[in-house]
Amino acid sequence: MDIEGVVIFEAASGVPLYSKMKGNTDPSLFSSFVSAIGHFSKEMRFGGLSSFTTDEKVIYLAPRDKTITALISPKKKEYQEAYSLASELGRRFEDGRSITTMPLTEDYDDFEEIADEFLKRIKNPFVSNVSSFVHSNYGGEVSIEARLFKRDGGQGVIDILIDTSSKENGSTNGGSLFGEHYIFVKASEGILGRVQLIDFIDSLDRFGVRFMNKDEFVFRPYFPSRAVVVARDFDLGALQFLEKYSNKGKTYIDGAHIYAGLKLKDIPKETRCFIDLWQWRDDAPPEQIQI
């Protein structure tokens, strides 16, 4: 879903508390404009204003006790659900935050991370649904489109990253010295092919941390404890590729995957990254595929 702007402002004064907008639109002018329309609507006894449209945009307003959350989107029929999304975003903003009569925008800078994660879910509903499934199935904290440092010093993106370090039971089954609390998730809305799967498997030691050791940079891969692939269907070639990693009913990548590329001798040989495949179904729970 394409959301072009988010503005959360104090209901009484119209002061913007948080904003993220495309272009150079002034959030103060926008919130003042919306507040004026809202006051006018009440003066005319039209009732509270929940949305209004221009020739090209739809502005959805979700009022709460102390704040109003506005979402700006293109004028299309499929954006009718935006009101409930704005209401949910506003609820998250108000939870645990004190809204004063003279608010300062910088007092709410901590909301940036929450808003970014929320907007990612709106823009990619399939990945959002998958993230909800893997969270309920594997636990931990879930991040969508997580950015991690790569071996070459750049950054890469994992569709969904699960951090299970907060679980009471400790680490997940398997794991390594560095990434035992991580689960990498690949989400494919179509048919996952052999090449896509190989690229995902190859990425398991591609992300990690770089640090100084005896005057030189050393790369340590996370090598997650589990790699989860969720797709609507799997190409036969992709399933055949994984057969060589199957042993006694379990599918996993072992520590040799790291040794070959990085020649790291201090990573335990029993390191395992278990691989789970799930076939997504819209009308039923996902079905796990056995290799």
Image: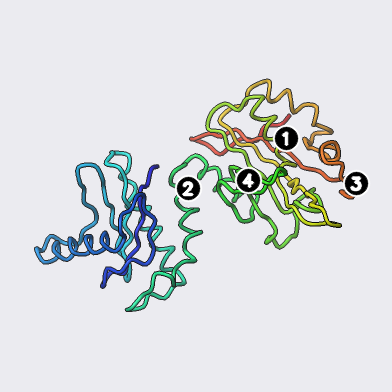
Nearer the observer, 132 or 71: 71
Q: Which residue bears the numbered disc 1?
A: 202
Which element carries disc 1, helix, strand or loop?
Answer: helix
Q: Earlier in the sequence, mark 4 or mark 2?
A: 2
**Residue holding disc 4:** 155
Pick whichever of labels 1 and 2 is earlier in the sequence: 2
Mark 1 burial class by Cα count in 10 Å: few <14, some 14-19, many 20+ = few
How far apart marks 3 and 1 lie (CA) works out to: 19 Å
Front tag of 1 and 4: 4
Label 3 sits on a secondary structure element that is loop
Give the Cα separation between the discs numbered 4 and 2. 21 Å
Q: Amino acid at mark 4?
A: Gln
Q: CA distance from mark 3 to mark 2?
A: 40 Å
* Mark toward the start of the polypeptide (3 vs 4): 4
Say whether disc 3 or disc 1 marks the residue closer to the N-terminus.
Answer: 1
Alpha carbon of mark 3 to alpha carbon of mark 4: how far? 25 Å
- Give coordinates of residue 163: x percent, y percent: 66, 54
Residue ID for mark 3: 265
Q: Amino acid at mark 3?
A: Lys
Earlier-in-chain disc, 3 versus 2: 2
The numbered dot on residue 121 is 2
Report the mark closest to the observer, 4 or 2. Answer: 4
